[in-house]
Image: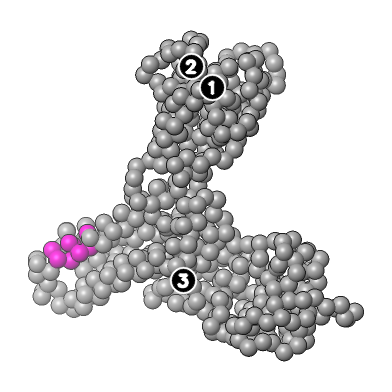
Amino acid sequence: MTSKRPPADPDSTIVGVATGTPDGGVAIVRLSGPEARSLVEPLIGTLPAPRLLARRRVLDSSDGSPDDALVVWMPGPRSFTGEDVVELHVHAGARNVGRIVAALQERGARAAGPGEFTRRAFEHGRLSLEQAEGIAALIAARTSAAIDQARRLVAGELGREVEALRSAVGDLRAEIEANLDFPEDVTDGDVSRWREELLRHEATARAWLGSFAAGQRARERARVVIAGPPNAGKSALFNALLGRSRAIVSPTPGTTRDYVEAELELDGLEVVLVDTAGLRQATSDSIEHEGIGRSREQIAGAELVVWLEPADTATADAPPSSGLRVESKRDLGRRRPDWLGVSAQTGEGLAALRSEIAGLVRGDETAPWIGLARHRDRASDAAAAMASASSLLATAAPLELVAFELGVAERQLAEITGRDALGPIGEDVLARIFSQFCIGK
Protein backbone atom coordinates (compact mmCIF):
# COMPACT_ATOMS: atom_id res chain seq x y z
CA MET A 1 0.00 0.00 0.00
CA THR A 2 1.52 3.32 -1.01
CA SER A 3 0.42 6.90 -0.50
CA LYS A 4 1.79 10.33 0.16
CA ARG A 5 2.30 11.22 3.77
CA PRO A 6 0.18 13.98 5.29
CA PRO A 7 2.03 17.28 5.07
CA ALA A 8 1.93 18.36 8.75
CA ASP A 9 4.40 16.64 11.10
CA PRO A 10 3.70 13.06 10.05
CA ASP A 11 6.19 11.68 12.59
CA SER A 12 5.02 13.71 15.57
CA THR A 13 3.12 12.23 18.48
CA ILE A 14 -0.52 13.26 18.39
CA VAL A 15 -3.16 13.41 21.11
CA GLY A 16 -6.94 13.54 20.94
CA VAL A 17 -10.13 12.46 22.68
CA ALA A 18 -11.19 9.17 21.08
CA THR A 19 -14.66 9.07 22.63
CA GLY A 20 -17.56 10.96 21.11
CA THR A 21 -17.88 13.75 23.68
CA PRO A 22 -16.03 14.48 26.93
CA ASP A 23 -19.23 14.83 29.00
CA GLY A 24 -20.15 11.15 29.43
CA GLY A 25 -19.06 8.84 32.22
CA VAL A 26 -15.65 7.97 30.80
CA ALA A 27 -13.47 9.63 28.17
CA ILE A 28 -10.56 8.06 26.32
CA VAL A 29 -7.53 10.24 25.66
CA ARG A 30 -5.39 8.66 22.95
CA LEU A 31 -1.74 9.30 22.05
CA SER A 32 -0.07 7.87 18.98
CA GLY A 33 3.47 8.31 17.79
CA PRO A 34 7.10 7.59 18.61
CA GLU A 35 7.09 9.61 21.86
CA ALA A 36 3.78 8.34 23.23
CA ARG A 37 5.45 6.46 26.08
CA SER A 38 7.93 9.15 27.07
CA LEU A 39 5.25 11.85 27.06
CA VAL A 40 2.75 10.02 29.24
CA GLU A 41 5.02 8.39 31.83
CA PRO A 42 5.78 11.66 33.68
CA LEU A 43 2.01 11.93 34.31
CA ILE A 44 1.26 8.36 35.37
CA GLY A 45 4.52 6.67 36.28
CA THR A 46 5.45 3.30 34.80
CA LEU A 47 3.24 2.01 32.02
CA PRO A 48 1.55 -1.37 32.53
CA ALA A 49 2.46 -4.43 30.48
CA PRO A 50 1.40 -4.15 26.82
CA ARG A 51 -2.33 -4.53 26.06
CA LEU A 52 -3.41 -4.84 29.69
CA LEU A 53 -5.62 -2.24 31.36
CA ALA A 54 -4.19 -1.11 34.69
CA ARG A 55 -5.15 1.55 37.20
CA ARG A 56 -2.88 4.57 37.43
CA ARG A 57 -3.00 8.01 39.03
CA VAL A 58 -2.77 10.85 36.52
CA LEU A 59 -1.01 14.02 37.70
CA ASP A 60 -2.04 16.60 35.13
CA SER A 61 -0.82 19.79 36.76
CA SER A 62 1.83 21.17 39.10
CA ASP A 63 -0.57 21.39 42.06
CA GLY A 64 -0.40 17.61 42.36
CA SER A 65 -4.15 16.91 42.16
CA PRO A 66 -4.50 13.40 40.71
CA ASP A 67 -7.23 11.66 38.71
CA ASP A 68 -7.87 7.94 38.60
CA ALA A 69 -7.47 6.35 35.18
CA LEU A 70 -7.24 3.00 33.46
CA VAL A 71 -4.22 2.97 31.16
CA VAL A 72 -3.41 0.68 28.26
CA TRP A 73 -0.08 0.62 26.38
CA MET A 74 -0.02 -0.78 22.83
CA PRO A 75 3.43 -0.78 21.23
CA GLY A 76 3.50 -0.55 17.45
CA PRO A 77 3.06 -2.06 15.00
CA ARG A 78 0.36 -4.06 16.82
CA SER A 79 -1.90 -1.10 17.47
CA PHE A 80 -4.74 0.67 15.70
CA THR A 81 -2.44 3.21 14.05
CA GLY A 82 0.56 0.90 13.66
CA GLU A 83 2.52 3.25 15.95
CA ASP A 84 3.10 3.25 19.69
CA VAL A 85 -0.26 4.06 21.27
CA VAL A 86 -1.24 4.90 24.84
CA GLU A 87 -4.85 5.33 25.92
CA LEU A 88 -5.95 6.95 29.19
CA HIS A 89 -9.48 6.01 30.23
CA VAL A 90 -10.28 8.91 32.54
CA HIS A 91 -13.30 10.46 34.25
CA ALA A 92 -15.22 12.48 31.72
CA GLY A 93 -16.12 16.15 31.86
CA ALA A 94 -14.85 18.79 29.48
CA ARG A 95 -12.62 20.51 32.03
CA ASN A 96 -11.10 17.33 33.44
CA VAL A 97 -10.37 15.90 30.00
CA GLY A 98 -9.14 19.27 28.74
CA ARG A 99 -6.58 19.51 31.55
CA ILE A 100 -5.15 16.07 30.76
CA VAL A 101 -4.95 16.81 27.03
CA ALA A 102 -3.34 20.19 27.76
CA ALA A 103 -0.75 18.55 30.04
CA LEU A 104 0.24 16.16 27.26
CA GLN A 105 0.45 19.00 24.76
CA GLU A 106 2.68 20.96 27.13
CA ARG A 107 5.06 18.01 27.07
CA GLY A 108 5.20 17.97 23.27
CA ALA A 109 2.16 16.13 21.90
CA ARG A 110 0.40 17.75 18.96
CA ALA A 111 -3.41 17.98 18.77
CA ALA A 112 -4.68 15.41 16.28
CA GLY A 113 -6.51 16.69 13.23
CA PRO A 114 -9.76 15.25 11.83
CA GLY A 115 -9.28 11.58 11.04
CA GLU A 116 -5.55 11.67 11.73
CA PHE A 117 -5.49 8.51 13.87
CA THR A 118 -7.32 6.60 11.15
CA ARG A 119 -5.13 8.08 8.46
CA ARG A 120 -2.04 6.87 10.29
CA ALA A 121 -3.63 3.42 10.44
CA PHE A 122 -3.97 3.59 6.64
CA GLU A 123 -0.45 4.94 6.19
CA HIS A 124 1.00 2.04 8.20
CA GLY A 125 -1.03 -0.64 6.43
CA ARG A 126 -3.38 -1.38 9.33
CA LEU A 127 -6.43 -0.43 7.30
CA SER A 128 -7.19 -0.18 3.62
CA LEU A 129 -8.79 3.02 2.39
CA GLU A 130 -12.35 1.72 2.14
CA GLN A 131 -12.06 0.26 5.65
CA ALA A 132 -11.05 3.70 6.93
CA GLU A 133 -14.08 5.19 5.19
CA GLY A 134 -16.18 2.50 6.82
CA ILE A 135 -15.16 3.85 10.25
CA ALA A 136 -16.38 7.32 9.29
CA ALA A 137 -19.59 5.81 7.90
CA LEU A 138 -20.13 3.85 11.12
CA ILE A 139 -19.82 7.00 13.21
CA ALA A 140 -22.21 8.90 10.93
CA ALA A 141 -24.73 6.04 10.50
CA ARG A 142 -28.34 7.10 11.04
CA THR A 143 -30.12 3.82 10.33
CA SER A 144 -29.66 0.20 11.36
CA ALA A 145 -28.95 -0.72 7.75
CA ALA A 146 -26.26 1.96 7.58
CA ILE A 147 -24.60 0.49 10.67
CA ASP A 148 -24.64 -3.00 9.16
CA GLN A 149 -23.16 -1.77 5.88
CA ALA A 150 -20.47 0.27 7.63
CA ARG A 151 -19.46 -2.69 9.77
CA ARG A 152 -19.08 -4.80 6.64
CA LEU A 153 -16.89 -2.08 5.12
CA VAL A 154 -14.68 -2.00 8.20
CA ALA A 155 -14.45 -5.80 8.13
CA GLY A 156 -12.97 -5.58 4.61
CA GLU A 157 -15.81 -7.24 2.68
CA LEU A 158 -15.84 -4.65 -0.11
CA GLY A 159 -12.06 -4.55 -0.26
CA ARG A 160 -11.85 -8.31 -0.83
CA GLU A 161 -14.35 -8.14 -3.69
CA VAL A 162 -12.63 -5.18 -5.31
CA GLU A 163 -9.17 -6.67 -4.88
CA ALA A 164 -10.30 -9.91 -6.51
CA LEU A 165 -11.57 -8.00 -9.56
CA ARG A 166 -8.52 -5.75 -9.69
CA SER A 167 -6.23 -8.78 -9.59
CA ALA A 168 -8.17 -10.49 -12.38
CA VAL A 169 -8.02 -7.37 -14.57
CA GLY A 170 -4.31 -7.06 -13.84
CA ASP A 171 -3.69 -10.68 -14.82
CA LEU A 172 -5.50 -10.12 -18.12
CA ARG A 173 -3.52 -6.96 -18.78
CA ALA A 174 -0.26 -8.82 -18.10
CA GLU A 175 -1.22 -11.60 -20.51
CA ILE A 176 -2.05 -9.13 -23.27
CA GLU A 177 1.15 -7.16 -22.67
CA ALA A 178 3.13 -10.39 -22.96
CA ASN A 179 1.93 -10.62 -26.55
CA LEU A 180 2.83 -7.07 -27.56
CA ASP A 181 6.12 -8.11 -29.14
CA PHE A 182 4.56 -11.05 -30.97
CA PRO A 183 1.19 -9.82 -32.34
CA GLU A 184 1.41 -12.31 -35.21
CA ASP A 185 1.05 -15.15 -32.70
CA VAL A 186 -2.28 -13.83 -31.37
CA THR A 187 -5.16 -15.91 -32.75
CA ASP A 188 -8.86 -15.15 -33.07
CA GLY A 189 -9.37 -17.66 -30.28
CA ASP A 190 -7.12 -15.64 -27.98
CA VAL A 191 -9.01 -12.42 -28.73
CA SER A 192 -12.36 -14.15 -28.23
CA ARG A 193 -11.26 -15.56 -24.89
CA TRP A 194 -9.92 -12.19 -23.76
CA ARG A 195 -13.18 -10.49 -24.69
CA GLU A 196 -15.28 -13.07 -22.85
CA GLU A 197 -13.19 -12.69 -19.74
CA LEU A 198 -13.29 -8.91 -19.99
CA LEU A 199 -17.08 -8.90 -20.38
CA ARG A 200 -17.39 -10.99 -17.21
CA HIS A 201 -15.23 -8.53 -15.29
CA GLU A 202 -17.21 -5.57 -16.61
CA ALA A 203 -20.47 -7.29 -15.66
CA THR A 204 -19.19 -7.66 -12.09
CA ALA A 205 -18.54 -3.91 -11.83
CA ARG A 206 -21.86 -3.10 -13.50
CA ALA A 207 -23.66 -5.28 -10.96
CA TRP A 208 -22.11 -3.23 -8.15
CA LEU A 209 -23.31 -0.04 -9.79
CA GLY A 210 -26.77 -1.49 -10.34
CA SER A 211 -27.24 -2.15 -6.64
CA PHE A 212 -25.63 1.07 -5.39
CA ALA A 213 -28.96 2.92 -5.20
CA ALA A 214 -30.45 0.18 -3.03
CA GLY A 215 -27.55 0.50 -0.62
CA GLN A 216 -27.83 4.27 -0.56
CA ARG A 217 -31.56 4.07 0.20
CA ALA A 218 -30.86 1.70 3.08
CA ARG A 219 -28.23 4.06 4.54
CA GLU A 220 -30.47 7.12 4.47
CA ARG A 221 -33.81 7.93 6.05
CA ALA A 222 -36.27 8.61 3.27
CA ARG A 223 -38.62 11.57 3.76
CA VAL A 224 -42.25 10.47 3.51
CA VAL A 225 -44.52 13.51 3.32
CA ILE A 226 -48.23 13.39 4.11
CA ALA A 227 -49.96 16.07 2.03
CA GLY A 228 -53.44 17.00 0.91
CA PRO A 229 -56.22 19.55 1.31
CA PRO A 230 -57.16 21.07 4.69
CA ASN A 231 -59.10 18.86 7.09
CA ALA A 232 -58.18 15.66 5.25
CA GLY A 233 -57.01 14.01 8.46
CA LYS A 234 -53.29 14.34 7.78
CA SER A 235 -52.32 15.02 11.39
CA ALA A 236 -54.58 12.24 12.66
CA LEU A 237 -52.97 9.79 10.23
CA PHE A 238 -49.51 11.09 11.17
CA ASN A 239 -50.22 10.35 14.85
CA ALA A 240 -51.79 6.98 14.05
CA LEU A 241 -48.75 5.84 12.08
CA LEU A 242 -46.44 6.96 14.87
CA GLY A 243 -48.60 5.37 17.53
CA ARG A 244 -48.55 8.54 19.66
CA SER A 245 -49.84 12.11 19.61
CA ARG A 246 -47.19 14.21 17.93
CA ALA A 247 -49.24 16.69 15.88
CA ILE A 248 -52.26 18.75 16.96
CA VAL A 249 -55.52 17.37 15.58
CA SER A 250 -58.52 19.68 15.14
CA PRO A 251 -61.62 19.81 12.87
CA THR A 252 -60.80 23.45 12.13
CA PRO A 253 -59.17 23.83 8.67
CA GLY A 254 -55.71 25.37 8.77
CA THR A 255 -54.79 24.10 12.25
CA THR A 256 -51.43 22.81 11.01
CA ARG A 257 -49.40 25.91 10.16
CA ASP A 258 -45.95 24.36 9.76
CA TYR A 259 -44.62 20.94 8.95
CA VAL A 260 -43.96 18.46 11.76
CA GLU A 261 -41.59 15.52 11.38
CA ALA A 262 -40.75 12.39 13.36
CA GLU A 263 -38.77 9.19 12.89
CA LEU A 264 -40.79 6.09 12.03
CA GLU A 265 -39.82 2.45 11.55
CA LEU A 266 -41.74 0.48 8.93
CA ASP A 267 -40.99 -3.21 8.44
CA GLY A 268 -37.41 -2.66 9.58
CA LEU A 269 -37.00 0.42 7.37
CA GLU A 270 -36.41 3.78 9.06
CA VAL A 271 -38.02 6.87 7.50
CA VAL A 272 -38.75 10.47 8.44
CA LEU A 273 -42.52 11.01 8.40
CA VAL A 274 -43.62 14.59 7.73
CA ASP A 275 -47.04 16.13 8.45
CA THR A 276 -47.76 19.27 6.41
CA ALA A 277 -50.21 22.14 6.33
CA GLY A 278 -53.27 21.64 4.15
CA LEU A 279 -53.00 22.88 0.57
CA ARG A 280 -55.57 25.25 -0.84
CA GLN A 281 -55.44 27.90 -3.51
CA ALA A 282 -56.40 31.06 -1.58
CA THR A 283 -56.19 32.14 2.05
CA SER A 284 -56.18 35.55 3.68
CA ASP A 285 -54.20 34.27 6.65
CA SER A 286 -50.55 35.20 6.09
CA ILE A 287 -49.30 32.57 8.55
CA GLU A 288 -51.31 29.82 6.86
CA HIS A 289 -50.05 31.08 3.50
CA GLU A 290 -46.46 30.65 4.75
CA GLY A 291 -47.31 27.17 6.01
CA ILE A 292 -48.67 26.21 2.59
CA GLY A 293 -45.42 27.40 1.00
CA ARG A 294 -43.41 25.23 3.36
CA SER A 295 -45.67 22.27 2.59
CA ARG A 296 -44.90 22.61 -1.09
CA GLU A 297 -41.17 22.70 -0.29
CA GLN A 298 -41.51 19.47 1.68
CA ILE A 299 -43.41 17.83 -1.17
CA ALA A 300 -40.70 18.85 -3.63
CA GLY A 301 -37.99 17.27 -1.46
CA ALA A 302 -39.84 14.06 -0.57
CA GLU A 303 -38.83 10.56 -1.61
CA LEU A 304 -42.51 9.63 -1.32
CA VAL A 305 -45.65 11.76 -1.06
CA VAL A 306 -48.71 10.23 0.62
CA TRP A 307 -51.56 12.27 -0.86
CA LEU A 308 -54.55 12.25 1.44
CA GLU A 309 -58.18 13.12 0.68
CA PRO A 310 -61.14 12.45 3.01
CA ALA A 311 -63.96 10.03 2.25
CA ASP A 312 -66.61 12.49 3.48
CA THR A 313 -65.60 15.36 1.17
CA ALA A 314 -65.08 15.82 -2.55
CA THR A 315 -62.07 17.94 -3.50
CA ALA A 316 -61.87 20.24 -6.46
CA ASP A 317 -58.11 20.02 -6.96
CA ALA A 318 -56.69 17.08 -8.88
CA PRO A 319 -54.21 14.94 -6.89
CA PRO A 320 -50.57 14.88 -7.99
CA SER A 321 -49.66 12.51 -10.80
CA SER A 322 -47.17 10.62 -8.66
CA GLY A 323 -47.16 9.41 -5.08
CA LEU A 324 -49.37 7.14 -3.01
CA ARG A 325 -53.09 8.06 -3.08
CA VAL A 326 -54.88 7.42 0.19
CA GLU A 327 -58.48 8.06 1.19
CA SER A 328 -58.83 8.92 4.87
CA LYS A 329 -61.84 8.74 7.19
CA ARG A 330 -63.02 5.45 5.68
CA ASP A 331 -65.15 4.99 8.81
CA LEU A 332 -67.36 7.74 7.34
CA GLY A 333 -67.80 6.17 3.91
CA ARG A 334 -66.04 5.50 0.62
CA ARG A 335 -65.79 7.97 -2.24
CA ARG A 336 -62.64 6.74 -4.02
CA PRO A 337 -62.82 2.91 -4.10
CA ASP A 338 -59.61 2.51 -6.13
CA TRP A 339 -57.54 4.40 -3.53
CA LEU A 340 -55.96 2.82 -0.48
CA GLY A 341 -58.39 3.45 2.36
CA VAL A 342 -57.56 4.14 6.01
CA SER A 343 -59.22 5.31 9.19
CA ALA A 344 -57.15 6.86 11.94
CA GLN A 345 -60.11 6.38 14.28
CA THR A 346 -60.67 2.64 13.80
CA GLY A 347 -57.21 1.63 12.55
CA GLU A 348 -58.64 0.29 9.28
CA GLY A 349 -56.01 0.05 6.54
CA LEU A 350 -53.09 1.27 8.67
CA ALA A 351 -51.17 -2.00 8.42
CA ALA A 352 -51.64 -2.06 4.64
CA LEU A 353 -50.52 1.57 4.38
CA ARG A 354 -47.39 0.88 6.44
CA SER A 355 -46.51 -2.05 4.20
CA GLU A 356 -47.18 -0.05 1.02
CA ILE A 357 -45.01 2.87 2.16
CA ALA A 358 -42.17 0.52 3.12
CA GLY A 359 -42.36 -1.26 -0.23
CA LEU A 360 -42.30 1.97 -2.26
CA VAL A 361 -39.41 3.45 -0.25
CA ARG A 362 -37.40 0.25 -0.34
CA GLY A 363 -37.88 -0.10 -4.10
CA ASP A 364 -36.82 -3.29 -5.83
CA GLU A 365 -35.36 -6.19 -3.90
CA THR A 366 -31.88 -5.75 -5.36
CA ALA A 367 -29.28 -6.72 -2.77
CA PRO A 368 -27.72 -3.41 -1.68
CA TRP A 369 -24.08 -2.73 -2.48
CA ILE A 370 -22.17 -1.49 0.56
CA GLY A 371 -19.93 0.80 -1.50
CA LEU A 372 -20.08 4.54 -0.87
CA ALA A 373 -20.32 7.33 -3.46
CA ARG A 374 -16.54 7.51 -4.02
CA HIS A 375 -16.41 3.75 -4.53
CA ARG A 376 -19.28 3.97 -7.02
CA ASP A 377 -17.45 6.64 -9.04
CA ARG A 378 -14.26 4.61 -9.23
CA ALA A 379 -16.16 1.42 -10.13
CA SER A 380 -18.01 3.34 -12.85
CA ASP A 381 -14.73 4.62 -14.30
CA ALA A 382 -13.29 1.09 -14.20
CA ALA A 383 -16.33 -0.35 -15.97
CA ALA A 384 -16.08 2.33 -18.66
CA ALA A 385 -12.40 1.53 -19.22
CA MET A 386 -13.17 -2.19 -19.49
CA ALA A 387 -15.96 -1.45 -21.99
CA SER A 388 -13.49 0.58 -24.05
CA ALA A 389 -10.94 -2.25 -23.95
CA SER A 390 -13.59 -4.72 -25.08
CA SER A 391 -14.55 -2.48 -28.02
CA LEU A 392 -10.89 -2.15 -29.01
CA LEU A 393 -10.51 -5.94 -29.04
CA ALA A 394 -13.64 -6.26 -31.18
CA THR A 395 -12.20 -3.87 -33.80
CA ALA A 396 -8.74 -5.48 -33.88
CA ALA A 397 -7.15 -2.31 -32.52
CA PRO A 398 -3.49 -2.43 -31.42
CA LEU A 399 -3.02 -4.43 -28.24
CA GLU A 400 -1.12 -1.52 -26.70
CA LEU A 401 -4.38 0.45 -26.57
CA VAL A 402 -6.22 -2.49 -25.01
CA ALA A 403 -3.53 -2.87 -22.34
CA PHE A 404 -3.65 0.86 -21.64
CA GLU A 405 -7.43 0.77 -20.99
CA LEU A 406 -7.03 -2.25 -18.73
CA GLY A 407 -4.37 -0.36 -16.79
CA VAL A 408 -6.84 2.49 -16.33
CA ALA A 409 -9.47 0.05 -15.04
CA GLU A 410 -6.97 -1.53 -12.67
CA ARG A 411 -5.94 1.89 -11.33
CA GLN A 412 -9.54 2.95 -10.73
CA LEU A 413 -10.30 -0.22 -8.79
CA ALA A 414 -7.10 0.16 -6.78
CA GLU A 415 -8.14 3.66 -5.69
CA ILE A 416 -11.13 2.16 -3.89
CA THR A 417 -8.90 0.30 -1.44
CA GLY A 418 -5.77 2.45 -1.66
CA ARG A 419 -3.74 -0.56 -2.82
CA ASP A 420 -2.21 0.69 -6.04
CA ALA A 421 0.83 -0.90 -7.62
CA LEU A 422 0.68 1.64 -10.47
CA GLY A 423 1.42 4.71 -8.34
CA PRO A 424 0.54 6.50 -5.08
CA ILE A 425 -2.96 7.60 -4.18
CA GLY A 426 -3.07 11.35 -4.56
CA GLU A 427 -2.80 13.59 -1.51
CA ASP A 428 -5.92 15.46 -2.66
CA VAL A 429 -7.94 12.23 -2.54
CA LEU A 430 -6.70 11.35 0.94
CA ALA A 431 -7.23 14.88 2.23
CA ARG A 432 -10.86 14.89 1.06
CA ILE A 433 -11.55 11.53 2.68
CA PHE A 434 -9.97 12.09 6.09
CA SER A 435 -11.12 15.71 6.46
CA GLN A 436 -14.64 14.34 6.88
CA PHE A 437 -13.70 12.44 10.05
CA CYS A 438 -14.25 13.79 13.54
CA ILE A 439 -11.37 14.74 15.84
CA GLY A 440 -10.00 11.74 17.74
CA LYS A 441 -10.71 9.13 15.05
Q: Nearer the viewer, residue 135 or 163?
A: 135
Q: Residue tagged by mark 3? A: 128
Q: Which residues are magenta?
A: 192-199
> The C terminus lies in which quarter of the figure?
bottom right
**Measuring 34% from the left and 61% from the top, which residue is drawn there?**
382
Asked if 39 appears above or below 20 in the picture, the reply is below
Measure the C-alpha gap from mark 1 to mark 2: 8 Å
Callout 1 environment at 10 Å: few (<14), some (14 to 19), or many (20+)? few
Judged from the image, the secondary structure of the residue bearing numbered disc 2 is: helix
Q: Nearer the viewer, mark 3 or mark 2?
A: 2
Callout 2 environment at 10 Å: few (<14), some (14 to 19), or many (20+)? some
Q: Residue tagged by mark 1? A: 345
**Measuring 9% from the left and 66% from the top, which residue is drawn there?**
188
Q: For this view, does 198 lie left or right of residue 407? A: left
Q: Nearer the viewer, mark 3 or mark 1?
A: 1
Label 1 with label 2: CB-CB less than 8 Å: yes
Measure the C-alpha gap from mark 3 to mark 1: 54 Å
In this picture the colour scheme is one colour
Measure the C-alpha gap from mark 3 to mark 2: 58 Å
Q: Residue tagged by mark 2? A: 331
